[in-house]
């Protein structure tokens, strides 16, 4: 086997992004080049690494096995570069932006652990709903629920957030056989996929409460106000809330991490991002 590291990095990018176009944007290469290189890699290895579908690239059994080892190689390569840079002692400020619930329930535990390992570094976690500008340096690293289309932004798929429908025990006993009440996002976010999905599954249900905070929705739901679609990382951890089966799960959300290309070689950004992606994988 004579596969080189550049081809393996292309494989890794396609596996993480799920599409050839997304991987090409992330690596700054053309789709045709990426497609040609991955086919050459498959021929070199003698295995089909991806199943090509209308929705994108799915890892085959062999591809999944290769992915596990290549991802570890990537982490080791990053560690080597950090050592060679002579800047193992991470220090300074790194500003991270994301939504409130993702920051509180997903990033906070990871950042707390990372901070304990690198006490000389300061992480400023800013939770807000607006799309901050990486070009204007409003943040160094951003986690958000849509892909980045700004120029000069490097992005990677961080994780997939699963959602579920929840109701309190008291509410479910009261609503049994009757009309449901719904707790949904406020009107500014009324077209989110989970909102339209819930209305489609329960067309006769009455919308009684709206909130732009998933944590507020969870509190309303816990207090018996109605059904709410919540991230599983929130709903599963609240005593008294129960998953409700409506025939299919609500749509989840892909989470993307992005940073400006000027920070590509920043040791503290790479260290935090690698630790976060490893914890979320």
Image: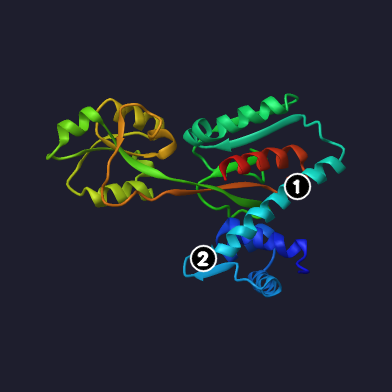
Q: Residue at x 35, y 42 (%)?
A: 164
Reply above or below: 126 against 35: above
- Quadrant location of the N terminus in the rendered image: bottom right
Task: Report which quarter residue 85 is drawn in.
Answer: top right
Q: Position of residue 205 (x, y in %)?
A: 19, 43
Q: Is residue 213 visible?
A: no
Q: Nearer the viewer, mark 2 or mark 1?
A: 1
Side of 142 where 91 appears, left or right: right
Q: Position of residue 63 (x, y in %)?
A: 60, 63
**What residue is disc 2 on?**
56
Reply above or below: 130 against 9: above
Side of 257 where 246 appears, left or right: left
Residue lying furthest left in this view?
177
**What residue is disc 1 on?**
76
User: Label 1 neighbourhood size at 10 Å, few (<14), some (14-19), many (20+)?
Assistant: few
Q: Is residue 117 visible?
A: yes
Q: Earlier in the sequence, mark 2 or mark 1?
A: 2
Q: What's the CA distance linking mark 2 and mark 1?
A: 28 Å
Residue 224 bears which disc, if any? none
Q: Position of residue 223 (x, y in %)?
A: 28, 25
Side of 41 where 225 appears, left or right: left
Q: Position of residue 11 (x, y in %)?
A: 66, 62
User: Label 2 neighbourhood size at 10 Å, few (<14), some (14-19), many (20+)?
Assistant: some
Question: How many numbered marks, from 0 up?
Answer: 2
Q: Nearer the viewer, residue 74 or 22?
A: 74
Q: How is the image coloured?
A: rainbow
**Which element carries disc 1, helix, strand or loop?**
helix
- Quadrant location of the C terminus in the rendered image: top right
Q: Residue at x 81, y 41 (%)?
A: 82
Q: Residue at x 47, y 65 (%)?
A: 55
């Amino acid at each position: 086997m004579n596969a080189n590291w550049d081809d393996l990095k292309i494989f890794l990018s396609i596996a993480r992004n799920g599409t050839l176009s997304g991987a090409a944007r992330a690596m700054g290469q053309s789709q045709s080049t990426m497609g040609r290189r991955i086919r050459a890699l498959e021929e070199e290895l003698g295995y089909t690494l991806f199943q090509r579908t209308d929705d994108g690239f799915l890892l085959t059994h062999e591809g999944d096995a290769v992915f596990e080892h290549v991802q570890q190689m990537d982490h080791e390569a990053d560690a080597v570069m950090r050592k060679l840079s002579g800047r193992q002692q991470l220090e300074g400020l790194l500003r991270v932006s994301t939504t409130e619930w993702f920051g509180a329930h997903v990033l906070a535990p990871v950042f707390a652990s990372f901070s304990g390992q690198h006490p000389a570094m300061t992480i400023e976690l800013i939770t807000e709903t607006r799309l901050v500008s990486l070009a204007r340096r409003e943040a160094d690293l951003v986690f958000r629920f849509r892909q980045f289309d700004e120029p000069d932004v490097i992005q990677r798929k961080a994780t997939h957030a699963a959602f579920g429908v929840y109701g309190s025990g008291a509410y479910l006993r009261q609503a049994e056989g009757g009309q449901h009440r719904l707790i949904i996002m406020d009107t500014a976010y009324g077209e989110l996929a989970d909102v339209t999905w819930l209305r489609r599954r329960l067309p006769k249900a009455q919308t009684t409460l709206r909130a732009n905070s998933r944590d507020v929705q969870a509190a309303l739901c816990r207090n018996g106000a109605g059904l709410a679609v919540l991230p599983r990382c929130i709903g599963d951890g609240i005593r008294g809330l129960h998953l409700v089966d409506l025939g299919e799960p609500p749509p989840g959300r892909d989470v993307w991490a992005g940073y400006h290309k000027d920070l590509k070689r920043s040791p503290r950004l790479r260290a935090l991002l690698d630790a976060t992606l490893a914890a979320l994988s």
